[in-house]
Image (cartoon, grey):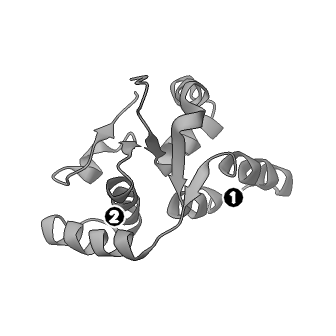
């Protein structure tokens, strides 16, 4: 999985697994941190969990270690194309479209959510 030119978009669930002490997620992030990005949607989804003030600040600091990709017109238009192919929840569609437009490999445990879309997906578990 460690390819020299691989760049990854990390799905929200991978961040949550890491925060919950799941070694596989933590090790993947440690080994690939310089090649990992997150969508602004992941930033929002992860921070939607109930954290104490101190935990929330730590999580924000963690999320800010990634390059965060904001939604733009290209990503929005890709969402519309994806929607023609598959009924997909908007947050998942935005994450998928972010990976597609930026030519990133999506790292997620929920491979099924992204089936039938033209996207490279990897389940690290």
In the picture as drawn, the residue positioned furthest to the front comes out as: 5
Q: Residue at x 15, y 72 (%)?
A: 84
Q: Residue at x 28, y 68 (%)?
A: 78
Look at the image and tell me in which quarter the C terminus lies: top left
Position of 71 relative to 9 (above/below)? below
62 sits to left or right of 110: right
In the picture as drawn, the residue positioned furthest to the right comes out as: 54
Image coordinates for residue 49, horizontal then vertical, percent: 63, 58
Residue 85 in which image quadrant: bottom left
Residue 65 in which image quadrant: top right
Mark identifier at residue 50: 1
Image coordinates for residue 54, horizontal then vertical, percent: 85, 51
Image coordinates for residue 29, horizontal then vertical, percent: 57, 32
Mark 2: few, some, or many residues within 10 Å (few <14, many ≥20)? many
Image coordinates for residue 35, horizontal then vertical, percent: 52, 37
User: Along the polypeptide, which appears first: circle 1 or circle 2?
Assistant: 1
**Residue that badge 2 annotates:** 93
Position of 84 relative to 68 (above/below)? below
Mark identifier at residue 37: none
Whole-angstrom CA distance, mark 1 to mark 2, is 24 Å
77 sits to left or right of 45: left
């Amino acid at each position: 999985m460690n390819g020299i030119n691989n760049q990854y978009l990390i799905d929200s669930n991978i961040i949550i697994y890491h925060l919950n002490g799941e070694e596989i997620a933590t090790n993947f992030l440690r080994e690939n941190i310089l090649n990992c990005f997150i969508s602004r949607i992941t930033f929002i989804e992860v921070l939607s969990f109930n954290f104490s003030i101190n935990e929330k600040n730590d999580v924000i600091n963690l999320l800010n270690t990634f390059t965060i990709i904001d939604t733009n017109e290209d990503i929005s238009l890709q969402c519309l194309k994806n929607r023609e192919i598959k009924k997909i929840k908007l947050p998942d569609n935005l994450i998928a479209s972010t990976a597609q437009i930026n030519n990133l490999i999506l790292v997620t445990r929920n491979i099924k959510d992204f089936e039938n879309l033209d996207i490279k997906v990897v389940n690290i578990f």
